[in-house]
């Protein structure tokens, strides 16, 4: 079917606006992050139902460490709790969880929870959910270069496909559609290599208000566009 051909294989989301959502309602910043985590669940289901193979969600960037300590620690607690709470649901829905980023820099209990979720959901074959955690596109490229140097790669034999094999997303398709909520129109150091030819869709809504209908609208916009890849 034509509409199936136009479906993106990999959708990436910059889930922005949690803090502004909370502040405009006179709520603690952490309340925005709570709602932001809840907003992910219906989008994961919708992506799976649309037959999208990979969904990447930006949850915590390396730059977020500069935020107030109580916000950072609270966010880690929320992520830890969400992973523990929803792993069984993800298994039932055939979702495989992968963490994309420098997990080793997170608190030990968060590392354990996330690794357990990765192990338990490894058999999921309907959708791969990349949780981009302590992630930076530039850091990913640096880590890939370090891995190649550690493997004594011959500079004359380095190609783009060879380099891609050392990225966090090795074996996954490049991003076809990148959605950003919150009104800003930039990629903010997210999947820089993988999104080189992604279609960009910006949504003014804050992430906690982003709904299935908004996701469907982004997919419809993707389907309307002609992708030429420089040709």
Image: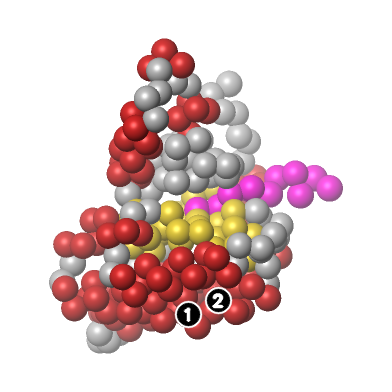
Instruction: From the image, tell me which residue sits under label 2.
Output: 87
Nearer to the camera, 66 or 226:
66
Q: Residue at 34% x, 75% y: name it.
A: 109
Left or right of residue 206, residue 212 in this image = right
Q: Which region of the structure is painted magenta?
A: 1-12
Kindly indicate whether the residue at mark 2 contacts the one at mark 1 (C-beta within 8 angstroms).
yes
Q: Residue at 16% x, 73% y: name it.
A: 69
Question: Residue 99, position in %: x, y?
Answer: 45, 59
Instruction: From the image, tell me which residue sits under label 1.
Output: 84
| Label 1: how many Cα within 10 Å (few below 14, some 14–19, many 20+) | some
Q: Is residue 144 magenta?
A: no
Left or right of residue 94, residue 148 in this image = left
Question: Residue 35, position in %: x, y?
Answer: 41, 80
In the structure shown, which secondary structural element does the residue marked by tag 2 occupy?
helix
Q: Residue at 60% x, 34% y: name it.
A: 227
Nearer to the camera, 192 or 168:
168
**Relative to 170, does residue 158 appear above or below in the rendering?**
above
């Amino acid at each position: 079917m034509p509409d199936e051909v136009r479906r993106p294989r990999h959708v990436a989301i910059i889930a922005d606006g949690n803090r502004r959502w909370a502040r405009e309602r006179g709520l603690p910043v952490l309340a925005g992050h709570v709602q932001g985590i809840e907003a992910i669940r219906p989008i994961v289901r919708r992506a799976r139902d649309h037959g999208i193979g990979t969904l990447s969600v930006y949850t915590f960037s390396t730059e977020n460490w500069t935020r107030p300590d109580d916000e950072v620690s609270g966010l880690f607690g929320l992520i830890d709790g969400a992973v523990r709470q929803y792993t069984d649901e993800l298994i039932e829905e055939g979702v495989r969880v992968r963490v994309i980023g420098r997990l080793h820099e997170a608190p030990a209990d968060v590392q354990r929870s996330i690794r357990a979720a990765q192990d338990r959901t490894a058999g999921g074959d309907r959708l791969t959910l990349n949780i981009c955690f302590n992630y930076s596109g530039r850091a990913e490229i640096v880590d890939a270069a370090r891995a190649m140097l550690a493997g004594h790669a011959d500079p004359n034999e380095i190609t783009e496909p060879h380099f891609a094999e050392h990225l966090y997303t090795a074996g996954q398709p490049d991003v076809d559609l990148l959605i950003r909520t919150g009104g800003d129109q930039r990629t903010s150091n997210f999947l820089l290599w993988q999104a080189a030819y992604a279609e960009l869709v910006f949504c003014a809504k804050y992430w906690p208000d982003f709904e299935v209908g908004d996701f469907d609208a982004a997919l419809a916009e993707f389907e309307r566009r002609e992708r030429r890849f420089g040709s």
